[in-house]
Image: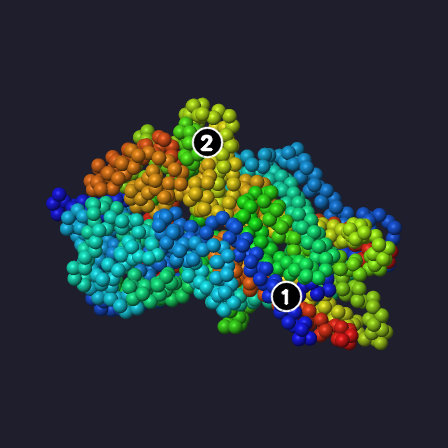
Amino acid sequence: MLLQALGKIAQTLVVLFFVSVASFGLLKLAPGDPIQIMLGSEYSQESYDSLKTELGLDQPFLVQYADWAGRFIQGDWGTSYVARAEIFTYAFKEALPVTLTLASFSLAFAILIGVPLGVLSAIKKDTIFDAGSAVLALTGTAFPSFLLGILLIWFFAVKLQLFPVMGYVSPWENFWLGIYHMILPGLTLSTYFIAMITRLTRATLIEVMEQPYITAARARGEPSWRVVWVHGVRNIAMPLVTILGLQLGVLLQGTVFTETVFNLPGIGQMLTSAVLGREYLVVQAGVMMTAALFIGVNLLVDLSYPFLDPRLRARK
Amino acid sequence: MSMHTPEAPATLSPPVPLDTAKRSRRSVFVRRPFFTIAVIVTVAYLVAALFAPQVAPFDPVTQDFNVMMQPPTAAHLFGTDSYGQDILSRVIYGARFALIIGIFAVLIGAAGGLVIGLAAGLSGGASEWALMRLIDAILALPSLILAVAFIAILGQGVDKVVIAVGLSMIGPFARTVRSDVLQVRVQLFIEAAQLMSIPYLRVVWRHVLPNVIFPLAVQVTIRISEAILVSSSLSFLGIGVTPPTPDWGLMIAEGRDFVSFAPWMSAMPGFALALLLIALTIVGDGIREEFDPKLRKDS
Amino acid sequence: MTKLDHKKVLAERLSARFGRRAVLKGLGAGIVTAATGSMPSLARAQQSGHIKIASIKVIDTLDPHFTGFLSSIQIINNIHNGLLKIAYDGENVTFEPDLAESWDLEDDKTHVFKLRDGVKFHDGTPCDAEAVKFSLLRVKEGQPKSPHAWKLALLERIEVVDPLTVKLVFSQPYAFLPVALNGSTGRAGTIVSPAAVQKYGTDYGRNPVGTGPFKFVSWKENDSIELEANPDYFEPGLPKLERATFVLMNEASTALAALMSGQIDGMTDCPMQLVNQIEAFPNATLYGEIEGNYTFVGMNCKRSPFDDINLRRAVAWALDRDTIVKQAYFGRAQQAYTPISPPMTDFFDPDIATSGRGQWYDLDKAKAFRAKAANQGEIEAVYMMAERGPVGTRIAQTVAPMLAEIGIKAKLELVEPATWVKRRNGSDFDLYDFEWVADLDPDETLYPEFKSDGAWNFGGWVNTDFDDLCAQAQVELDPAARRALYYKAEDLLMDEAGIAVMAHMPIYKVFSNKVKGFKYIPADLVNLHSVSLG
């Protein structure tokens, strides 16, 4: 058990190492550097050179990487080159909570909308409702999320004035206001997952409903709502959790656009502006956090199977 | 971590699987009306893409500032954009770029994924371990960041977008391929073949590959939509396809500043894209349900 | 020259630089210039209201001596003061003493500034002659080197005469000084707290401490920059607002939606494609005029094919400026014949269109030059563009068909902004379009941009006569003589077609109608000093 845990940790570290080298190297290969961007048009070569030395960007690649890695491990994430932002504060304390809030909200939306829709589709299989929900779910996934976000803003926030256009309010500080600000972005980000969960739920349930124990439950005279919602839906948990773990990357990718359109100061916006601005250290912080999140969630998914599936527990 | 996770269906489950018990020998097209419609739509897009010069009423990049930002009229059925270019013609030509980007990006992703996935699945020991960590790393890197970085390195334009999007899709493909290989590797017929001392590469070629290629092909059909979406998202970030290429993603991105008074500029290419993606998904699902042995329990 | 003459020259330079121009909307009566001079602040201003303004462009740093962006200056200017400030009464742009109470010329190379008494930085330290000296030296020779150091290159020494008097001695008469101390991204004359610089070092840009009407509170990346009123501000009755938030945004269409829904009160910049929508929206007012700028298609004179003067001339005459203005700038810009822009009233010729000077659209002439070009085949040229600047790739897209008319196939290359900067600075292009903005003087409009070995001369056009003319003009204090020199210099540039000049652009700000008292200054400033929320 301990050995297994150590193995996992070693694996995680190796993956994080690969990730950090890849992102650092890729961005360094891309032309442009932060000082050129910072100096705008009216600059002098002298001040360019002087700033380059000051920021350590004149060092060779490996030195820069080693310098970064050494500090990062010790918890010193550095400061951004141009704006001199404390990266730990910026990335971990400010941006991460925003993205986590957005992601949890959209997952909650996806489950709250997707599961019932999927169950109803399964029950009313091959009816107009079933077809309609399938088409609706597909439509949600077929628009680029930024267009969907812009359309939602113009309709619900500007025309109907129902929701705020943009901005983030921490639900920890003001719960209802926080939720209020998360409804449109959460919905925008969740469309892909609503579709996915609807279809997953529907397929799983159709399969489950043919199982003998369901027939047995029915035979026992249990009411049909109970058969479906208690015995049937329980089975959705495992495939759902699995797929959510695997599709976390898609979710994190979606935050880039949702955050830009709704102006949420999260990791997505942070990473995009950092990549475009060649803020190598900020990119590293963002990539390490998303990678750790991705690995961590998938570990949790692994660990959760015994709890979700009694059969797995029994086997141990 | 991902590789120990039982491989879930990487895509969505069937939207409209027919009641398998009642399946008859009637033609697919009769049994699956949605599938049929989707195939027709897809073919229509293909035709539009192939014969764009014949079908489109205008040249897609001819500017005319006298008709800038006109709403749909008889002359310009889909309206015009902020350069006075005819949106209908651009949407028709756009089918070319959407399909080129979708198909070729996915092929690059699938080819790369096949190589890495096969290597990881077949090799053992340290190299397998290292390859697995590599796949995990690719998966853990946000693919959009990968695409942006590749674009920054390669430069921009349709060909570069194809490569960048394709490279960023290698990770998910590699994962599916590897898990398929693992499933095949433990099958009895492989063991039998090895016992019969058939050369290793031949076993791979004759027995492993065919069992991996099919699920991969299904993946390819389904991921085409993803590739098109990613490429349009790149245009939103101001990188990607070069204007004035009639690319839908670019058109949507360019039109977003005019949503409040010229919504057709984004909406028309948006609908064209959505329709194609829906059709592609239904076609992909249909093919999978019809031909995937795992889903054909009754046959 | 006697002392009086210098004063006269100074007075001339400071007044009537800008002519009367139409004001779009809003800007009307009731603009009260704040009284200068150290009045005892009897009643402290009663501050109220919290304004939220979208800032769509990049904020690089709040350190005035290191920023390269006007969008940063917009915020910095609310936190800091300069020795001089730019003032505008709807007709004329003038340079008025700001932290200085008076400004005298002892001789044509020696400027004496008398400072206001009792002004304190937000950290409580006094803003005295030593602080002024410290700030100017930080620009001139600080480490790391300020990008604005060149503006004070002619500054020989700074003398602290007494705690409130500082004397600047230059090696030559320096006609550009008021602009250098003030203008656009210059802000070389912005005074920062020496104590704060010592305390924060290179992190000063995140902890700016000035003397301005607002104090810096916080800066959250991609989120907001918060300012609060400085109750001890030296201009009586100001500021009127209690708090100001600059909402940092990347997406202009969202900012527009937020403005229309009332979530924000203004935008520090209004991209041209949004202007029509703002005008149609009744609850907001657009502020903006043609400012001191010009846009152009740059050609790489260092390499083939545009090392050929006839080909460059063909391009210069082939651009249909009318179409460019209508299509690329949504009809908002004004055709340019030469780089000197309308706000420089001492230098701009209102009849330039009929004067025969400069460049304009004449396809026959273009074709005649094209016929003289060395390469008579179809020429393929790399046109580098990026989603940057006021109209993104619109100019390139509009210009490409015009170049096709004269047998130049523009290969449009979309590159990422960071790459674009890299390639521009490395002269790795055939064609590109660019704009020099927020210029207040012909010197900064022409000389550093097209000086033969100039760092910003990305196209590499070389003409030593041009250099000489500009150098002479720099030390020429008589406006008429200076104008003649700049006209000659411009004519060289236009004739040899170092660039194909296109347009002068308006720069817009937007405020909702409940925002009162905003004073528009045609130098891309968003000064909130006198702003209140009605």
The residue indicated by pointer 1 is A11
Q: Secondary structure at mark 1?
A: helix
In the image, what residue occupies the spot 47% across and 54% down? A60
Q: Is residue A119 above or below residue B114?
A: below
Inspect this view and state whether residue A282 appears: no
Q: Position of residue B120 (x, y in %)?
A: 70, 57
Give residue C342's quadrant in the image. top left
Callout 1 amino acid: Gln
Mark linked to residue A315: none
Of residue B89 and residue C435, the one placed in the foreground of this image is C435
Which label sits in the foreground, 2 or 1?
Answer: 1
Callout 2 amino acid: Pro
In the image, what residue occupies the spot 72% across and 57% down? B123
In the image, what residue occupies the spot 52% across and 53% down? A27
Q: Secondary structure at mark 2?
A: loop
The residue indicated by pointer 2 is C305
Question: Crowding near pointer 2: few (<14 within 10 Å), some, many (20+)?
Answer: some
Q: Position of residue C18 (x, y in %)?
A: 27, 44
Q: Position of residue C490 (x, y in %)?
A: 31, 35
